[in-house]
Image (cartoon, grey):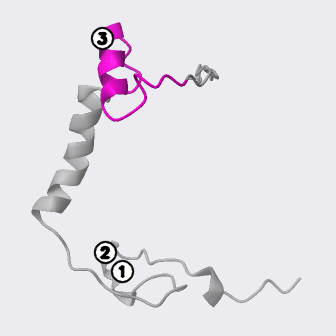
Amino acid sequence: MSNNSIWRRFPLLHNPVWSSGNRVLIGDALRGDGTLFARRDGIESAWRVVDPALQHPRPVHEYAKGSWGPAIANAFLPPPAVWHNPKEIEAFPF
């Protein structure tokens, strides 16, 4: 499988009539341009990920700024997995 994406640079146009709020989306919809709209399958996929987290929220665990997170984070991973903290590993002796 290969990636056949095409990257394009479109000119930035300013039009005071269609430049604020939902006017841009409405104008695009009237012209049939769906590039700024999310597709239904994308929205449904996002909700499959987000909805369980919203329905069953987990507690927030505070941790020190600059650290690799709270120690309890190891409990979220199945054994024998643990979070990897590169600061705790000694430098290679070469």
Furthest residue to the left? 55
Q: Residue at x 36, y 17 (%)?
A: 28
Within 10 angstroms of label 3, few (less than 14), some, or many (20 or more) residues? few
Q: Looking at the picture, which amino acid does disc 1 mark?
A: Ala
Q: Are marks 1 and 2 in contact (CB under 8 Å)?
A: yes
Give the residue pinned by disc 1: 73
Cα separation between marks 1 and 3: 49 Å
Q: Secondary structure at mark 1?
A: helix
- Quarter of the figure that contains the N terminus: top right
Q: Are marks 1 and 3 in contact (CB under 8 Å)?
A: no
Looking at the picture, which amino acid does disc 2 mark?
Answer: Phe
Q: Is residue 37 visible?
A: no
**SS assignment at label 3:** helix
Magenta span has 18? yes
Check residue 76 in the rendering and tell me which mark sits there, or answer none.
Answer: 2
> Relative to 64, is 49 above or below?
above
Q: On residue 30, which mark appears? A: 3
- Which secondary structure, mark 2? helix
Residue 63, image x, y percentages: 41, 88
Do the residues under discs 2 and 3 have CB atoms within 8 angstroms? no
| Residue range corresponding to the magenta coloring | 14-37
Give above or below for 83 relative to 43.
below
Dot 2 or dot 3, earlier in sequence? 3
- Give how far apart the Cα atoms at labels 1 and 2 are: 5 Å
Residue at x-position 62% and y-position 89%: 88
